[in-house]
Image (spheres, helix red, strand yellow):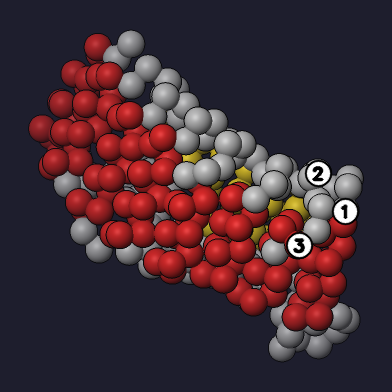
């Protein structure tokens, strides 16, 4: 199910999102056939998006594997609800929460949930520009040890410091399941470039790494090139 441009509660027209989405959440709680649910530019708002997401934990849904929200007004409440779904009996294998405001508590909750989750394969969180260093570190730590997570997108986070990315690079170095990572449009410190070079030298699972619009400097490019040359 793909919903695009769903009206918010302030719009005219039937029915407003703060009424329709909770109803959909109740249906999601008992649905047994829907496998993919996507909201793009849907103006849900955080409360409604969280209410929908919580449908995965309120009932007996075991069919939904893909939950995707992009520019849907989702935020911290939604992230906490998604974390509860990941920690519970849901079958989610793909979680996409892009261009929202998950907040420190929301990101930390996702990290905690990943610590017990055994089924997620794809996690896309680009454009969530208010991640705190502590929240990102908690998330990265869980990513590094997750047994099934293979694809992660943490691009365009507008990090306060280039060093904020170091925990994610450390996670990439120790992960044995990650095959695809997107870190486009993030600042990276000299220490980060050195750690990334170590990742490329030693990681045996990574197949695709996207680093668009990252300024490494001449020395950083040389270090990465040397690391790629010996990557096995």
Q: Residue at x 28, y 59 (%)?
A: 133
Q: Which residue is more in the foreground, 231 or 82?
A: 82
152 relative to 17, above or below: above
Mark 2 → mark 1, Cα distance in angstroms: 8 Å
Dots 2 and 1: beta carbons under 8 Å?
A: yes
Q: Which residue is mark 2?
A: 63
Q: Which dot marks residue 206?
A: none
Q: Which residue is mark 3?
A: 58
Position of residue 151 measured from the top left corner of the image (x, y, whole percent)? 51, 35
Q: Which residue is mark 1?
A: 31
Image side of residue 147 versus residue 10, left or right: left
Rendering quarter of residue 15: bottom right
22 relative to 229, above or below: below
Q: Residue at x 81, y 80 (%)?
A: 19
Q: Earlier in the sequence, mark 1 or mark 3?
A: 1
Viewer-side label of 1, 3:
3
């Amino acid at each position: 199910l793909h919903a695009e441009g769903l009206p918010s509660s302030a719009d005219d027209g039937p029915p407003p999102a703060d009424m329709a989405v909770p109803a959909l959440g109740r249906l999601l709680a008992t649905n047994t056939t829907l496998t993919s649910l996507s909201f793009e530019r849907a103006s849900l708002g955080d409360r409604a998006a969280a209410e929908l997401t919580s449908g995965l934990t309120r009932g007996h849904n075991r069919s939904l594997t893909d939950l995707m929200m992009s520019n849907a007004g989702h935020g911290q409440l939604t992230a906490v609800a998604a974390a509860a779904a990941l920690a519970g009996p849901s079958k989610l294998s793909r979680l996409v929460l892009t261009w929202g405001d998950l907040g420190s508590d929301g990101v930390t909750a996702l990290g905690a949930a990943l610590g017990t989750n055994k089924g997620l394969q794809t996690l896309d969180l680009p454009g969530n520009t208010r991640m705190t260093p502590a929240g990102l570190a908690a998330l990265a730590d869980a990513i590094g040890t997750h047994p099934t997570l293979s694809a992660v997108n943490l691009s365009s986070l507008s990090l306060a410091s280039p060093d904020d990315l170091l925990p994610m690079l450390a996670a990439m170095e120790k992960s044995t399941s990650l095959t695809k990572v997107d870190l486009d449009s993030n600042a990276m410190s000299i220490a980060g470039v050195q750690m990334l070079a170590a990742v490329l030298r030693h990681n045996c699972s990574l197949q695709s790494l996207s680093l668009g619009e990252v300024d490494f400097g001449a020395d950083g490019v040389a270090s990465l090139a040397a690391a790629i040359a010996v990557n096995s």
